[in-house]
Image: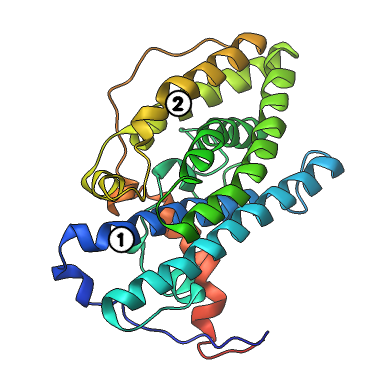
Amino acid sequence: MTQTLVAHAPSQDLGHAPLARTAPLQYVLRLADNALILGQRNAEWCGHGPALEEDIAMANISLDLIGQARLLYAHAGVLEGRLTGRARLEDEYAYWRGEREFRNWTLQELPHSGPLAGTAHADRDYAVTIMRNFLYGALMAELWPALADSRDAELAAIAAKSAKEARYHLHHAAGWVVRLGDGTDASHARMQRALDHLLPYMNECFAPDPVEEAAAAQGVAVLTAALRAPWEATVHATLEDATLQLPAPSAFVSTGKFGLHSEHMSYLLAEMQGLARAHPGAQW
C-alpha cells in the first residue's frame, strides 16, 4: 500500500471541546503512544541483542507493539474525524506530533541504561529492558482483557487481539527476570538495580486522572487503579522466584501522560521522526 506523508498541525478544535467528548480519543491515543514508544525503544536492540535468539525475540515484540499502535492510531483517526470532520492518518500521529502532544507513560521513553548514565550514548543494559517489559507486560496482561469488554467495539476488538500478544510478552520478560535475578551475583545485582530504578515510574500508570476517569465513566476505558492488586500479585510472585527484593514504596509520580516528559523523549522522537520530517511528502 502506498501512503503519503504530509505534515499537518494538530487539530485546534479539540482544545475547547468538553472532556466528555474528547476523553475516548485521548484515552485511545494514550494506549497507542505507550505501544509505539516502547516498540521504538525495544527496536533499538535490533542487531545488538545479547544473543541471536533474543535479538529476534525483541524485534518480534517491537513489531507486536508497533502493530498495536497502528490499529489504535487508525481508530483514533476515526474518533477524531467524528469530532472535527477530519480523520488523521496513523503516520501523522506518529511522525508529525511534537513532544508535548505525546501522552505515553514516562516509563516507556526511558533509555536502556540506568539512572546515572548519559542520555545519548550510554551503554545499554539488557536488565533494564527486560525489567521494563516485565513491569509493563504484567499490567497490559490485565488491562487488555479488561478492555475487551469496552463499549467501544473497535477498541474491544483491538484489546482482544493485543491480549494474546501481551501474554507472550509477559511470559518472555518474566522468564528472563527469574533467569537473571536468580543467576550469577552480577546478573542479580543488575536486575535489582533495574527494578529499583524503574518501579517508581509505575506509579504514573495507576494514578487516576480526568481523561481515564471520563472515558471509564462512558464504559470505554478501564481504571488502571483497579488492576493494581492483580498486577502486584504477578510482580511479587515473579520477583520472589527471581530472589529480588521490592524497593521501599515511592511517592514519585511521573507525568508523561500529561505531555510532560523526561529529557530522553526528545532524543527518541528525533530518531523516530527524522526520516519522515526530512522527506515530507515521501511515498513508499
Q: Quadrant of residue 12?
A: bottom left
Which image quarter holds the N terminus?
bottom right
> What kind of residue is marked 1?
Arg
Residue 191 on image: x %, y %: 61, 22
- Total marks shown come to 2
Q: Could you say which is closer to the camera, residue 222 or residue 236?
A: 222
For label 1, the SS is: helix
Q: How crowded is mark 1: few (under 14 residues within 10 Å), some or many (20 or more)?
A: some
Q: Do the residues labelled 1 and 2 touch (CB within 8 Å)?
A: no
Q: Could you say which is closer to the camera, residue 92 or residue 190?
A: 92
Q: Name the residue under label 1.
A: 100
Earlier residue among tags 1 and 2 = 1
Using the image, determine if residue 26 lies above or below residue 168: below
> What kind of residue is marked 2?
Leu
Using the image, determine if residue 237 lies above or below residue 40: above
Which image quarter holds the C terminus?
bottom right
